[in-house]
């Protein structure tokens, strides 16, 4: 536009490259920075304490130190949470509903993300009444994921839940392939896993977070401060089920679950 300049940096799996890009953006002294995903926030906050930052896809902004509180962020950052920890319990419940025979669940997590520990703790609390044991599986690289899932799958009645992270997105094709190969029912947090062949997803509309973030960027450009703009959580969630994947796993989806689905992929 005539009065707006946009400088873009694309995130990579390389943490050092993300830090370099964050420093570059901060050095430009922009009026506001839009950050997508948890992997960019820590480098940006290290690079600047003054440039306003609007984040999306935040998982635990208070626990991660991005803001003082959700209602009053207090610093130079605010934005939008992907979801609260309670959704992890919902994933486990949905997995048990679509595959009642599951008694063991491998939880794929990136241990470098603090919120992953809290998500796993939520599942641990929900698991006993469901008759399920949850087992943590680290996601440092593709080889580790493959070894761990193959080892887990040697015992019957298993299921799979990846906790949201850049690592899970990066290795999504591998995770979906392993779930199919070892006949592991799996629940994911976003529909792009279902589109790629995953069984089921339950989570917020992530694209909508960027639409909402544009509103915060506009308000900051008009003079408001991030410290005064509350962090907001997603309020609408979508359940998507892949019928072809269910059939390949030998699952009969309960009619009550199908009725609740926002979308069914044939």
Image (spheres, rainbow, N blue to C red):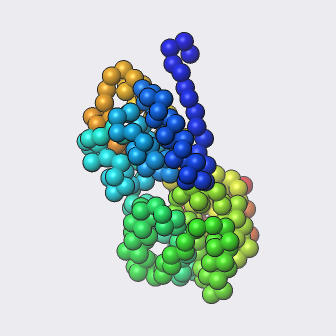
147 and 164: which is toward the camera: 147
Picture residue at 56% right of the left edge, 29% below the top: 7
Q: Picture coordinates of residue 194 (x, y %)?
A: 65, 56
Q: Picture coordinates of residue 12 (x, y %)?
A: 61, 49
Picture residue at 40% right of the left edge, 79% below the top: 129
Q: Picture coordinates of residue 232 (x, y %)?
A: 36, 43
Q: Quadrant of the N terminus?
A: top right
Picture residue at 37% right of the left edge, 74% below the top: 125
Q: Is residue 7 left or right of residue 151?
A: left
240 and 228: which is toward the camera: 228
Q: Is residue 154 above or below residue 239?
A: below
Q: Is residue 200 left or right of residue 28?
A: right
Q: Is residue 17 above or below residue 194?
A: above
Q: Is residue 18 left or right of residue 26?
A: right
Looking at the image, the residue that sits furthest to the top is: 2
Q: Is residue 51 above or below residue 38?
A: above
Q: Is residue 33 above or below residue 14?
A: above
Q: Residue 170 falls in which quadrant of the image?
A: bottom right
Res 210 seen here: no
Q: Is residue 230 left or right of residue 171?
A: left
Res 66 seen here: yes
Q: Residue 155 falls in which quadrant of the image?
A: bottom right
Q: Quadrant of the C terminus?
A: bottom right
Picture residue at 45% right of the left edge, 64% below the top: 116
């Amino acid at each position: 536009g005539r009065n707006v300049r946009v400088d873009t940096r694309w995130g990579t799996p390389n943490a050092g490259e993300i830090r370099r890009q964050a420093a570059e953006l901060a050095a430009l002294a922009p009026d506001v920075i839009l950050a997508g995903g948890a992997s960019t926030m820590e480098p940006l906050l290290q690079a600047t304490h003054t440039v306003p930052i609007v984040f999306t896809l935040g998982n635990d902004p208070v626990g991660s130190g991005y803001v003082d509180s959700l209602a009053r962020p207090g610093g130079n950052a605010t934005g939008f949470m992907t979801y609260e920890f309670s959704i992890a319990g919902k994933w486990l419940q949905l997995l048990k509903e679509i595959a009642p025979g599951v008694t063991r669940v491998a939880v794929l997590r990136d241990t470098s993300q603090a919120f992953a520990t809290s998500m796993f703790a939520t599942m641990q609390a929900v698991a006993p009444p469901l008759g399920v044991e949850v087992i943590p599986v680290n996601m440092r690289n593709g080889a580790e994921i493959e070894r761990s899932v193959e080892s887990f799958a040697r015992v019957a009645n298993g299921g799979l839940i990846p906790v949201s992270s850049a690592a899970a997105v990066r290795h999504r094709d591998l995770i979906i392939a392993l779930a199919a190969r070892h006949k592991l029912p799996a629940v994911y947090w976003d529909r792009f896993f279902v589109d790629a062949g995953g069984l089921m997803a339950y989570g917020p509309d992530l694209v909508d977070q960027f639409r909402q973030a544009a509103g915060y960027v506009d308000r900051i450009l008009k003079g408001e401060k991030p410290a005064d703009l509350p962090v907001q959580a997603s309020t609408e969630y979508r359940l998507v089920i892949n019928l072809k994947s269910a059939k390949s796993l030998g699952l009969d989806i309960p009619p009550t679950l199908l009725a609740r689905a926002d979308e069914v992929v044939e």
